[in-house]
């Protein structure tokens, strides 16, 4: 959530920032400013009327001592009280209106973010590894999975619906191995492991920016203000909602495995076959809480730690800086890691590493103090996929496929898998 002081002091800057995001929000910003002006005028009026109340209150004992009639003063105080109450109700209504509007305004992009209309204007920063090429037509991961008997979307479609998967046999083991490898790697790199709930309440969804704007992308539990989480970012960030952290302990770094659930409204037909865009998938998430002056240094570290997963797996990838037009709602700056997918002939997103600055912290009231006597300041929050597990499995199947239909297991996963090759399995199902 943006600071009203920023909107008030620099409305044209905020409007231009939204235009850089390819969004025209002039009307919303003007409406916020109009409400803000009304609120401030009412606050001044209420303060003046309270001062009049105090004056009248102090005059009552003087009137009584002098034998004067206090009825006019009492009537004046009653009228002032009723007016203050009415103004208070109006103020509450205006604050609610302003709150709704402010929660719909995305974050202001950092000045280092490239200005662009959409993902076509993202900027490639670096590549790692050579693109995997074959002397035959590479299979897509869904065909590899079907041939090996390890991926079964058809049965999942019968049981649940489209864009869900049953994993079978060695497919299950590969998914678990990837999760355990990621968690072990990040834990060794200083991240504290968290296993969060897969359900979060409405306040948590508001805190990280999923609500109210993206309600249609959420799976809501019927009759309850509970939602299936779209990422572990939601519960892990909200662990400190409303808290004041010890500045001496910052930055705090967490890694968390969770199932993720996304309705993906409006994304039909876009990478919906196979494991790339599912309604349910597994992910290991990295979350950081930092001091403002350290957050961009920590973003570089977080991005490197996500890259390390791909490097150890031997998967070619590139890093791109998202343009303003492709930036997520809450993000001030984002790097995407895109893994090479041979059957696609292109790189596919496998991680987004973002600095939200104080945008989420203001919504969730997450602050810190250097000492108990200091004024509390908003932390900066960061997160990144470290990594999306299903997409990692897809990338392994495609990049490590063999002409005979088997898949070589990346060396770092062999201790977890207990084998060096995935062959066709008879699952007995």
Image (cartoon, rainbow, N blue to C red):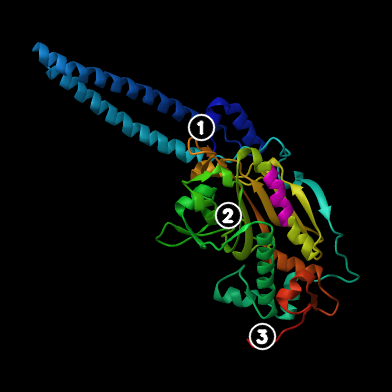
Q: Position of residue 275 (x, y in %)?
A: 68, 67
Number of other residues with Cα within 10 Å of mark 3, as a class: few under 14, some 14 to 19, many 20 or more: few
Mark 2 vs mark 1: give the one in front.
2
Name the spot of residue 208 as percent of width and height, x first.
Answer: 54, 49
Give the secondary structure at mark 3: loop
Residue 424 vs residue 362, the one in the foreground: 362
Within-10-Å neighbours for mark 2: few <14, some 14–19, many 20+: many
Q: Is residue 302 magenta?
A: yes
Label whose residue precedes the other's in the sequence (2 or 1): 1
Dots 3, 2 in contact, CB < 8 A = no
Relative to 13, is 318 above or below? below
- Location of mark 1 (residue): 4
Query: Magenta part of the protein: which range?
Result: 297-306
Question: Mark 3 highlights which residue?
Answer: 427
Query: Residue 6 appears at what percent x and percent y?
Result: 55, 30
Marker disc for residue 62: none
* Few, some or many residues within 10 Å of mark 1 (<14, 14–19, 20+): some
The answer to whether 403 is drawn above or below residue 132 in the figure is below
| 406 left or right, relative to 35 | right
Q: Quadrant of residue 90?
A: top left
Point out the image quarter for the C terminus: bottom right
Secondary element under disc 1, as helix, strand or loop, is: helix
Q: Quadrant of residue 324?
A: top right
Look at 77% across and 81% down and name the residue there: 423
Labelled disc at residue 233: 2
Compared across the picture, whether 222 is left or right of 105 comes to left
């Amino acid at each position: 959530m943006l600071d009203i002081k920023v909107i008030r002091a620099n409305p044209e800057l905020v409007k231009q920032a939204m235009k850089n995001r390819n969004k025209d929000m002039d009307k919303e910003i003007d409406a916020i400013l109009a409400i803000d002006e009304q609120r401030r005028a009412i606050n001044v009026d209420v303060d003046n009327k309270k001062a009049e109340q105090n004056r009248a209150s102090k005059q009552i004992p003087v009137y009584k001592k002098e034998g004067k009639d206090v009825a006019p003063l009492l009537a004046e105080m009653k009228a002032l009280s009723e007016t203050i109450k009415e103004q208070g109700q109006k103020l509450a209504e205006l604050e609610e209106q302003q709150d709704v509007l402010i929660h719909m305004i995305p974050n202001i992009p950092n000045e280092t973010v490239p200005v662009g209309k959409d993902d076509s204007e993202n900027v490639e920063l670096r590549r790692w590894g050579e693109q995997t090429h074959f002397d035959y037509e590479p299979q897509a991961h869904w065909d590899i999975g079907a041939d090996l008997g390890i991926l079964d979307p058809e049965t999942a479609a019968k049981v649940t619906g489209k864009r869900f998967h049953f994993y079978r046999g060695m497919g299950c083991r590969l998914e678990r191995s990837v999760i355990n490898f990621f968690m072990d790697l990040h834990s060794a790199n200083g991240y504290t492991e968290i296993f969060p709930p897969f359900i979060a309440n409405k306040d948590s969804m508001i805190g990280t920016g999923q609500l109210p704007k993206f309600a249609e992308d959420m799976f809501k539990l019927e009759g309850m203000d509970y939602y299936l989480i779209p990422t572990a970012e939601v519960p892990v960030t909200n662990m400190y909602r409303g808290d004041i952290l010890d500045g001496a302990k910052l930055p705090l770094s967490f890694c968390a495995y969770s199932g993720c659930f996304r309705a993906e409204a409006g994304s039909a037909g876009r990478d919906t076959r196979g494991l790339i865009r599912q309604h349910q998938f597994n992910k290991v998430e990295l979350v950081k809480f930092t001091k403002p002056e350290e957050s961009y240094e920590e973003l570089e570290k977080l991005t490197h730690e996500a890259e390390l997963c791909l490097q150890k797996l031997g998967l070619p990838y590139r890093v791109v800086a998202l343009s303003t037009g492709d930036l997520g709602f809450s993000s001030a700056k984002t790097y995407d890691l895109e893994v090479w997918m041979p059957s696609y002939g292109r790189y596919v997103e496998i991680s987004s590493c973002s600095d939200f600055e104080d945008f989420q912290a203001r919504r969730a009231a997450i602050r810190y103090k250097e000492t108990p006597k200091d004024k509390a300041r908003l932390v900066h929050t960061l997160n990144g996929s470290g990594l999306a597990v299903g997409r990692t499995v897809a990338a392994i199947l495609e990049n490590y496929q063999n002409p005979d239909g088997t898949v070589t297991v990346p060396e770092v996963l062999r201790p977890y898998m207990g084998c060096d090759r995935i062959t066709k399995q008879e699952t007995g199902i």
